[in-house]
């Protein structure tokens, strides 16, 4: 881990690129591959898979972004209260930024339909891609910030957590597209494209830190805010929309517990 930390500190852009490629594009594509040969995913199973992903995301937000950001802020400010206040404010700003994107960009969800400005001339599949891009960009941002931080625990924790949740999410997205009538290869390609969007987010995150490493606590808190918005506004409501409350709740607990255990193991 020390070697990885030194390497990421000397090559933050490359580290962010590799992290977001593996945790974003590769993990999502691998997760979506079964769409080529399986028949149908039941709503209950799909919701449980997304809820598992939500649990992992939630744990990664807390243990790999917020807590490390707070600890670094304490070192810089020499005040626990100021550090906590700063992290909370920046977390809120990250959430507000995501809420603003939701309002200004037209996008289409699988269950709740259209959001943002009124109907766009874009094809429906691209509106789906845009919706998932809004969802996935903060994940890439978090991986980029973590990988470029020079702290192997943060980088590995965020990349592993988001990569784990992208596998079931990739399959859920691909199967949802298949259920809407898209071809198998097209469903796989679109799901993979949504993972590729995280690479862009990763490079943006590394770009923030290239300005100054003193921005790391702020970048971690902002990334946590964007992730928390997606979990609360998008993923969890989607898992309960079909009326299967118990299974998604249990899956969320499993995902959260798994990521918590892995974070402790990485420490």
Image: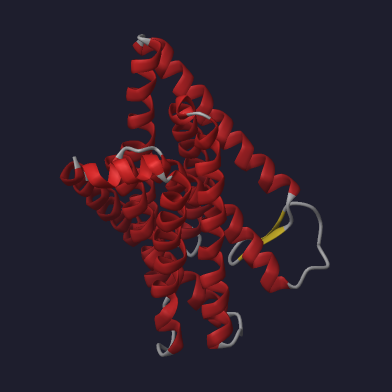
Q: Residue at x 39, y 45 (%)?
A: 147
Q: Nearer the viewer, residue 122 or 211?
A: 211
Q: Residue 34: image x %, image y %?
A: 40, 82
Residue closest to the eye, 118 or 242: 118
| Circle count | 0
The structure residue drawn at horizontal position 55% and vertical position 78%, both measured from the top left corner, is 189
x, y percentage for residue 233?
A: 54, 47
Residue positioned 69% across, 65% down in the render: 127
Q: Residue at x 61, y 34 (%)?
A: 96
Does 230 appear above or below 62? below
Question: Can residue 99 be seen here?
Answer: yes
Q: Is residue 142 left or right of residue 180?
A: left
Observer able to see residue 245: no
Figure quadrant of the C terminus = top left
Q: Is residue 35 left or right of residue 93?
A: left
Q: Position of residue 160 (x, y in %)?
A: 31, 54
- Which residue lies most toward the left here? 265
Q: Nearer the viewer, residue 150 or 45?
A: 150
Q: Is residue 31 left or right of residue 195?
A: left
Q: Position of residue 1 (x, y in %)?
A: 22, 45
Q: Does residue 112 lie above or below 76 as drawn?
A: below
In the foreground, 63 or 256: 63
Residue furthest to the front in view is 10
């Amino acid at each position: 881990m020390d070697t990885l930390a030194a390497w990421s500190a000397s090559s933050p852009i490359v580290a962010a690129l590799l992290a977001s490629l593996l945790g974003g594009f590769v993990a999502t594509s691998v997760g979506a591959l079964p769409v080529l040969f399986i028949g149908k995913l039941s709503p209950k199973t799909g919701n449980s898979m997304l809820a598992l992903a939500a649990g992992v995301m939630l744990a990664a937000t807390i243990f790999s972004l917020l807590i490390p950001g707070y600890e670094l802020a304490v070192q810089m400010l020499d005040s626990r209260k100021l550090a906590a206040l700063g992290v909370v404010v920046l977390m809120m700003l990250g959430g507000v930024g995501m809420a603003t994107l939701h309002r200004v960009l037209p996008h289409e969800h699988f269950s709740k339909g259209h959001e943002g400005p009124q109907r766009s001339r874009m094809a429906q599949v691209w509106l789906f891609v845009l919706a998932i891009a809004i969802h996935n960009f903060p994940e890439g941002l978090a991986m980029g910030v973590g990988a470029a931080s020079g702290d192997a625990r943060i980088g590995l924790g965020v990349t592993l957590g988001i990569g784990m949740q992208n596998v079931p999410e990739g399959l859920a997205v691909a199967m949802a597209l298949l259920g809407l009538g898209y071809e198998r290869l097209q469903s796989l390609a679109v799901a993979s494209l949504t993972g590729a969007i995280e690479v862009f987010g990763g490079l943006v995150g590394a770009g923030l830190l290239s300005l100054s490493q003193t921005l790391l606590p702020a970048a971690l808190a902002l990334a946590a805010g964007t992730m928390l918005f997606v979990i609360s506004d998008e993923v969890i409501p989607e898992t309960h929309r079909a009326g299967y409350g118990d299974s998604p709740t249990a899956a969320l607990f499993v995902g959260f517990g798994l990521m918590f255990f892995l974070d402790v193991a990485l420490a």
